[in-house]
Amino acid sequence: MSNTTASLRKKIAGAGDLQSVVRTMKAVAASSIGQYENSVRALADYNHAVELGLGVCFRQSGPVSTLESKNKKNDSAIGAVVFGSDQGLVGQFNDLVADFAVKTLAALPGKKLVWAVGDRVHARLEEAGLRLMGTFAVPNSVKAITPLVGQVLLESGDHRAKGEINELHLFYNRPTSGAIYTPVTQRLLPLDENWRRKLAGLPWPTENLPEVLGVGAETLKAFLNGYLFVSLFRACAESLASENASRLAAMQRADKNIDELLEELNVNFHRLRQSGIDEELFDVISGFEALNGKMK
C-alpha cells in the first residue's frame, strides 16, 4: 500500500510541475499576443501617411507600372509568401493556412513559386507538391519582424526584376476574436486598379494641397516600398498573434486536463490513504479485542 501511495505522490508532483510549465507558457503567449496586436495598431498612422502620399502620386501620374516587372517573361510565375510557424503546440494553425494557400493557388493559372515562413508550414506545402523557393525563420519578437520583411522584399524583388514572377500574394492567419483566427490572402503586386482609384480619391487633411517635387517616379517608388513594407509587416504580426492565440488555446486545454488529472489523482491518493488508516485501525481493534479476550 505504501508503494501505491508513493507512486501517486510522484504522479501528483509531476503533474504539478507540468502545470507550472503550462501556465508559464500561457502567460508568455498572452503577453506576445498583446505585443503583436499593439505593433499592428502602431502601423496605422504610418500606413495612413503612405496612403496619402500614394494618393497624391496617383492623382498626378495616373496609372503606373512602378515596381511591376518590365522584363516579364511568357512563362512568368505567381509568387506567394505563406506565413506559418517554427514551433509546435499550435493546433491546426499550419494545416489551416497551408490548405488555404494550396487551394487558392490551385485556382490561379500558371506556375507557382512559394516562400515559406516557418519550417512546419514549409513541410506541409512541400507535401502538397508546391515548388518551394526557400524558407525564412519565424521572428521571435516584434523587433525581428523588420529584418524578415527586408529579406522577403529582397528575395522576391530579385525574381520580379528578372521577370520570373509577375504577381506576389501573401497567405497568413488573421486573428478574429479570442483564440479564433482565419486564413486570408492579399495580392500585393500587381497593384489593384480599384485600390489605386480609391487612394487617388482620398481627401488631403489640410487646405494646402501637396505637390510632388523632383522625379515623380522615384517618389512613387518610395511610397510603394512603404506600402509593401506595411503590408508584409502587418501580415507577419497578425500571423504571429494568431500563432500565439492558437498556442494559448492549446495551453488552456492542457491546463484544464491537468486540473482534472490532479483532481483524480488526489481523490485516489486520499482514498488509498484513508483505506490504509482504516486497515491499521482495524488491526489495532482486532488485536485489542483478542488480547482482552485472553485476559478474561
Image (cartoon, rainbow, N blue to C red):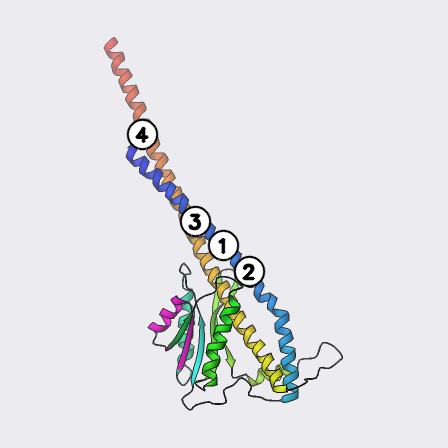
The residue under the point 46% across, 49% down is 23
Q: Where is residue 207 in the image (x, y as percent from the top left)?
A: 76, 79
Mark 1 sits on what residue? 28
Where, by quadrant of the figure, is residue 104 drawn?
Answer: bottom left
Mark 3 sits on what residue? 21
Q: Position of residue 94 (x, y in %)?
A: 41, 66
Residue 35 numbered mark, or none: 2
**Which quadrant of the rendered structure holds the C terminus?**
top left
Q: Which portion, as a residue range, is magenta?
A: 112-131
The disc labelled 1 sits on which kind of residue? Val
Distance, label 3 to label 2, CA atoms, is 21 Å
**Number of disc labels:** 4
Distance, label 4 to label 3, CA atoms, is 33 Å
| Label whose residue precedes the other's in the sequence (4 or 3) | 3
Mark 4 vs mark 3, foreground winner is: 3
The disc labelled 2 sits on which kind of residue? Gln
Mark 4 vs mark 1, foreground winner is: 1
